[in-house]
Amino acid sequence: MKTRTPFRNFLVSALLLTLCVAGAQTQIARAQALTDKMPVDPQITIGKFQNGMTYYIRANKKPEKRAELRLVVNAGSVLEDDDQQGLAHLVEHMAFNGTKHFPKNDIISFMESIGMRFGADVNAYTSFDQTVYILSVPTDKPEVLDRALLILEDWAHNLTFDPTETEKERGVVMEEWRLGRGAGMRMTQKIFPVILKDSRYAERLPIGKPEIIQNGKAERLKQF
C-alpha cells in the first residue's frame, strides 16, 4: 500500500477546504435567493380581471389540440374553524356533485362525452392553503372549450350542495379517510405537532376529522 507524501496531503487538504468554502458560499447564495421573488417563465402571460381573479396562460405545442385548465382557489384546510375540519375537502368533492349549470353528475357526463376520463383528465385536490380543480379538454371545437370554462366558473361560486348528494359524498370522503390510516398518516400525526408547533398546520390536516366529515352541519359546509 502506498503512503501519501506531505505534498499530496497538502493537496488533499487544500481541495477539501476549497470544497467546504464553495459549499458554504452556495448555501449563502441559496439563503439569499429565498428572499427574492420566484422568477416567472417569460412565455407565460399573466393578467388580472376586474373581479380580482388572476390568470396565467402558456402555449405548449405538445400535446396538440389540448388545453389543461386549472382553477386555483386560495383556500384550504388551515382556514377551517374547529367545527369545519374536513369540510374544505368535502367542498372540493361537492364540486363534482352538482352546480348551477351542471346538475348532479353532469360534469362527469360531459367530460366523458368528449372522450375525457375522470381522474386522468378531470380531477381536484385540497391542501392546507389551496384547492385546485383540473380539466383537460380538446380544443378543436370552440364550444367544448366554452363549456369547460363554464365548469370552472361554476366551481368558483355556483355549487348547489344538494342535500342528498352531500350525504352520499360524506361516505366517499370517509372511505378516503379510512384508506389513509396507514403508517405514513400515523407518523404525520405525531410529527406535525412537533415540527409545526403553535401553527394551524399542525392541527388542520386536509382530510379532517371523521366525526365532522360524517356529521358536520350543512350550513357550515356552505359557509366554508
Image (tube, rainbow, N blue to C red):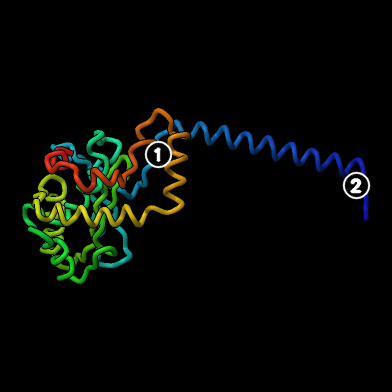
Position above or below: 80 against 120? above
| On-image quarter of the C terminus | top left
Position above or below: 1 against 15? below
User: Disc 2 or disc 1, which is closer to the eye?
Assistant: 2
Q: Is residue 150 left or right of residue 3?
A: left
Classify residue 205 by image quadrant.
top left
Q: Residue 4 shows which numbered tag?
A: 2
Question: Which kind of residue does numbered mark 2 sit on?
Answer: Arg
The image position of residue 14, as x and y in percent, is: 79, 38
Question: Which kind of residue does numbered mark 1 sit on?
Answer: Met
Compute the Cα span from label 2 to label 1.
48 Å
Q: Is residue 6 left or right of residue 35?
A: right
Q: Is residue 202 left or right of residue 1?
A: left
Image marks 2 and 1: residues in contact by CB distance under 8 Å: no
The image position of residue 46, as x and y in percent, is: 26, 43
The image position of residue 44, as x and y in percent, is: 31, 48
In the image, what residue occupies the spot 18% across and 69% down? Answer: 112
Badge 2 element: loop
Classify residue 164 by image quadrant.
bottom left
